[in-house]
Amino acid sequence: MGIRGWRTAGFAILGVACLLIWVSGSMAGTMIGFSVSTQVNPFYKAMADGVRDEAKALGMDATILNAEDKLEKQIADVEDLIQKKVQVIVINATHDGAAAVLNKAAEAGIPVVTLQRGVPGAKVASHIGTDNVVIGREGAEWVVKALNGKGNVVVMEGIPGAASSEDRKKGSAEVWPKYPGIKIVAQQSGKYDRAVALSVMENILQAQPQVDAVFCFNDEMAMGALAAVKAAKRTGIKITGMDANKDARDSVANGELAMTVALPPYDIGKMGATHAKWLITKEKPVPPRTVMPVSFITK
């Protein structure tokens, strides 16, 4: 091959190499931050895994910060992400009180994506999650049908002020008054926590001689309620959860829990990372709201 041929081939190889570098490294150095409410709960751990895995697949770096269900820590974590000048902040909020710091991020030019829990009053580019009002409504209807329209029901709410809990409360509250045979004998917060729910349910069982169903706003509380019911040797109580965590699915299969609602936390996390990428690259318009599908798991 002559000098001209080598030169032409060299430029071609260099061009291909540059193209490969651009394709593989086009998102290199892109940093997003995800503040998750907790990673003790398997649901939110799966969500964090979805964000992390999809960000990596898309060539982005993701900083995952665990708020440990503490609003003050989450605010401090988001402040830190703002200081680090991440390009997008993805958040699963512990409480509506996160609105102010999210607005601070937006004012700093950092788009915000909320996952599963909306934050009223916050300037948000995109929200991804299930419709918790609908879940609350349909879950309550399922309980009514399972009781044939008659029975004493305990409602176990999540963290007070958390959008998911407030929305599920709103949806279920639309249902109970429609059925005169349904009596809500207790409605308390189990704070989305298994140990807290166990303690709350123990007290309810001592106060209520007849309980026919326990409607829990997540699986962790359902498993805590189940443990309390077992310890009290009470039978025939239909306990339902939400999230379809593995132990809840196993309990449904074993005939212990009556039902759990399957939500897709991992897919919510993945879509959060995808929307973050679109916000950065502008390659696709980002929908302001994406509702993920759910299903009911029974034996």
Image (tube, helix red, strand yellow):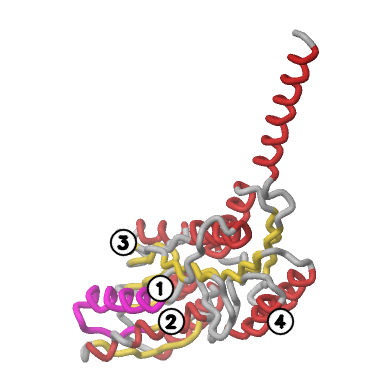
Task: Look at discs 1 and 3 and give the one toward the viewer.
Answer: 1
- Report the side of 145 relative to 131 (left or right): left
Q: Which residues are magenta?
A: 132-154
| Quarter containing the N terminus | top right
Task: Give me the C-alpha separation between circle 3 and circle 2.
Answer: 23 Å
Q: Nearer the viewer, residue 247 or 32?
A: 32
x, y percentage for residue 149? 20, 82
Is the C-beta separation of discs 2 and 4 under 8 Å?
no
**Which quarter of the figure has residue 173?**
bottom left
x, y percentage for residue 175? 29, 85
> Which residue has dot 2 on it?
167
Up the image or down, 72 lies above or below 49; here it is below
x, y percentage for residue 103? 65, 81
Q: Amino acid at mark 3?
A: Thr
> Which residue has dot 3 on it?
298
> Which residue has dot 4 on it?
72
Marks counted in the figure total 4
Label 2's element? helix
Is the C-beta separation of discs 1 and 3 under 8 Å?
no
Label 4's element? helix
Q: Nearer the viewer, residue 77 or 70?
A: 77
> Which residue has dot 1 on it?
131
Label 3's element? loop
Q: Earlier in the sequence, mark 4 or mark 3?
A: 4
- Report the side of 82 relative to 163 (left or right): right
